[in-house]
Amino acid sequence: MDRRKFLTNAGLLVTTVVGTQFLVGCGSDTGTGTSASVDPAGKSLRNLVYMTPLGHIISHADVYVAAHQGYFAEEGLLITPVGGTGTASSISQVAAKQAMFGKGAAVITCPLIADQNTEIVTVGQKDQVSQYSVASLPDKPLTHPEQWQGKTIGVISKGGTTELQLDAMSVAAGLDPAKVKKVVTGADVGSLEFLKRGEVDGFITFIGSETSFRQMKIDLHYLNTDNFAPLPGDSYFVTKETAEKEAAAVTSFLRACRKAWEFMADPANADKVLEAVGALNEIEVSDRDVAKAKILGEVKVSTPKNGKFLSIDVAAWEGALELMRKSGIMKDKSRPVTDFVNTSFIDAV
């Protein structure tokens, strides 16, 4: 499928970035092409595509802010964000060269690289701690994987990141994940209804819905998945070919996104962040108090110990590879961490 047809099918042939309407795909065959657009100041920009793992939500706000604040334009880029329907869509479109940049968690990308020779590599790590926690009732708190053996736990999607992380938590505690029944409860606040009805003993929630629950004064107990199975979360990836041939573009993308995170870290900029997100998803920012709390939550999970956003914690990736091999998530036993992550671009930023 050529890039123009892909974007037409995605409903994004014509879009608006930094207040300027432009046509995506003219003169370009793929999302990694060099189609040129012009910004309001008359500067020629290289037009590239970023495929989100899921829709347009605050979790991906750094890209929207980088566009809205002109950080991509400063780097000579015009990034078109396309909302994905799951991590698989982000990976498949990047691997097919319909997009240059994608985002996914290590628990998804690493097995594909190791066991299926998917030609992608992580170049920047967004989540420095897990976005996900096992939520349970305060009077029946789940504090250890042994407590949900033989019980039912809700996951965001079948076979996705959260189910794999739940399994890894059991394996890390020396328990059999097959003895846990998993049902899909989704990613929004409606997942709470499954718990209220007694259909699940707990459910995995992510930082966005957890923030909403707290803003709604709903009291739940949260057990972060990192407590038992630390696995690097959502991270930016490109194809290995792009890493070899497009170092400048990759570094520029990450530099602009880091500036966006620094901008987001200042609560005084919250309204402008919501403006950037709202341009693509008005519903996500309709409750401004909740949306601002989500921004703070995202900044919290995305801030590295060294304070430099998008830094890659190589030691964490090495530990994650060991755990995924132990839990059977990944069959490969020998590939080095450098097959999965490339720190040269974020180091260059």
Image (cartoon, rainbow, N blue to C red):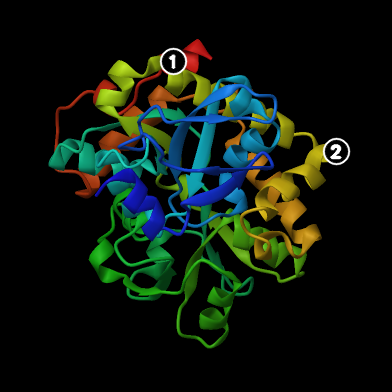
- Residue at x 48%, y 13% (from the top left corner): 347
Viewer-side residue, 81 vs 303: 81
Q: Nearer the viewer, residue 94 or 47?
A: 47
At 47% from the left and 76% from the top, the residue drawn is 201
The residue lying toward the viewer, choosing from 48 and 191, is 48
**SS for callout 1:** helix
Q: Residue at x 28, y 58 (%)?
A: 175
Residue most extreme to the top? 348
For label 2, count other residues whose C-alpha is less than 10 Å away and answer few (under 14), some (14-19) or many (20+). few
Does residue 17 appear left or right of residue 331 in this picture?
Answer: right
**Direction from residue 272 to residue 56 in the image, left or right:** left
Find the distance from the CA under tag 2 to the CA under tag 1: 31 Å
Farthest residue, direction right? 268
Residue 339: x %, y % from top left: 24, 25
Instruction: Find residue 268 and name its label.
Output: 2
Residue 49, horizontal then vertical, whole percent: 44, 39
Tell me which amino acid carries mark 2: Ala
Q: Secondary structure at mark 2?
A: helix
Residue farthest to the bottom, as pictured: 197
Vertical side of 243 occupied by 147: above or below: below
| First along the sequence among labels 2 and 1 | 1
Please state which of the two labelled residues, at mark 2 or mark 1, is closer to the viewer: 1
Residue located at (38% from left, 66% from top):
157
Residue 190 appears in the picture as rendered:
yes
Check the image and report above or below for 240 versus 323.
Answer: above
Residue annotated with mark 1: 248
- Circle 1 packing at 10 Å, graded few (<14), some (14-19), many (20+), is few
Indicate the amino acid at tag 1. Ala
93 horizontally vs 232: left or right:
left
Q: Are marks 2 and 1 in contact (CB under 8 Å)?
A: no
